[in-house]
Amino acid sequence: MSGIYIHIPFCKQACHYCDFHFSTSLKKKNEMIEAIIIELQLRKQEYTGQTVETIYFGGGTPSLLSNEELQLILGAVDTHYDVIVDPEITLEANPDDLSVTRIKALAQTPINRLSIGIQSFFDEDLKLMNRAHNSEEARKCLKEATKHFENITVDLIYGIPGMSKERWIQNIEEALSYNISHISSYALTVEPKTALASFIQKGIVDNVNDDEAQEHFHLLIDRLDEAGFIHYEISNFGKEGFFSKNNTAYWQGKSYLGIGPSAHSFDGHNRGWNIRNNTRYIKTINDGMLPMEIEHLSVTDKYNEYIMTGLRTIWGVSLNKVEKDFGKSYKDYVLLQAQPLINEHLLYIDDDKLLVTKKGKFLSDGIASDLFKLNLE
Ligand code: SF4
């Protein structure tokens, strides 16, 4: 089982908090699509003998591509890879690109899952984050999209400076009112060198408040649990049968191919990074080369990654797997490191699984780092 991730590195405008790779100039859009198609062809031998079960258009803003352009890329995937019947095909889309006509036309393409970047239903939040859409567009697009797509996920951001608890609850309730099957929700984080970091530093915007974010997170998990969602990964909640297949494969350590500038790949042993520059990406591909750096993962790297992703999911860290894949010394190590965290009720053991408690969920990345091993290889 394998997945293909395709990074579309263009956005209408830069959201103030974002540190993903994108350009706000669309000048190279056609060249980029051609280069992505060539990369798909150049890398087809990496998937010999494997079937593709999921295709994911991420970004950037993939909905900036027309349906025809997206289909051109999907055609190249079909030509060069062995794709299963009815794969999960996700499109990340922003509300301002999802007019009624566009949604109806999208529903006629093989794309069967929409990931809509709502973030908030309040204009003051959207303005603070410099999103390209407004709350009216968010509502209109959800109303229409839910008529044509069964599999929809929306992104919501909490912990926004100035966002009261009441406003956050209203956001959750409004998202639920559309009867969607999946929600991804993240705390606003201040990444270095973003506009948000600079506004906070200059005192123009209040800093994010960890305690408020933690309160929002707990309100979210309680309310979504009540509404029948399964909290299957720290930031992801899905109804039964609607977990993201693409992301689940990634969290379970399966291989995936990352196509496009800045995309990551993983083949089970090596991690690859495509160059984070549109012009250089296109040039390298047109020269017939792969614009990729490859890092071979040591046993310790793989152990650390398993701990990190395992603790973020409901599947937890299997102690038997740790022993089988990494050796008894790793199992002894993880149990020793976990003990103080178990005493603090941040971790618990269920059968052979090490899992984070509800109290530990907001802190899971920090907890994971306490279980990491230093890489001395
Ligand atoms: S639309 Fe998405 S990728 Fe583009 S700037 Fe905003 S958050 Fe970043």
Image: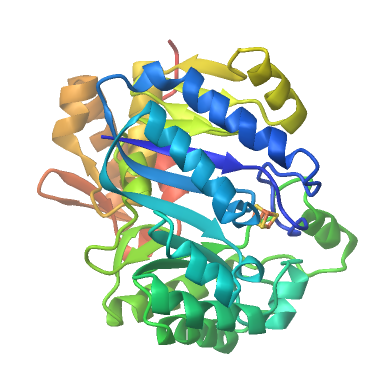
Relative to 296, 228 lies left or right: left
Identify which residue, 112 or 239, lies in the foreground: 112
Q: Measuring 45% from the left and 13% from the top, which residue is drawn there? A: 376
Q: Measuring 42% from the left and 77% from the top, which residue is drawn there? A: 146
Could you say which quadrant of the image residue 345 lies in?
bottom left
Quarter holding the C terminus? top left
Q: Position of residue 293 (x, y in %)?
A: 58, 17
Relative to 315, 124 lies left or right: right
- Residue lying at the far left in this picture: please name it: 351
Quarter holding the N terminus? top left
Q: Measuring 36% from the left and 46% from the top, which residue is drawn there? A: 246
In the rendered picture of this protein, how many numbered marks are placed on residues?
A: 0
Q: Position of residue 320 (x, y in %)?
A: 13, 33
Relative to 134, 226 lies left or right: left
Q: In terms of image quarters, where does ligand 1 lie?
A: bottom right
Identify which residue, 176 or 11, lies in the foreground: 11
Q: Compared with residue 131, is residue 318 higher up or lower down, i.e. above or below?
A: above
How are the colours assigned in the image?
rainbow
Relative to 345, 176 lies left or right: right
Q: Position of residue 105 (x, y in %)?
A: 50, 65
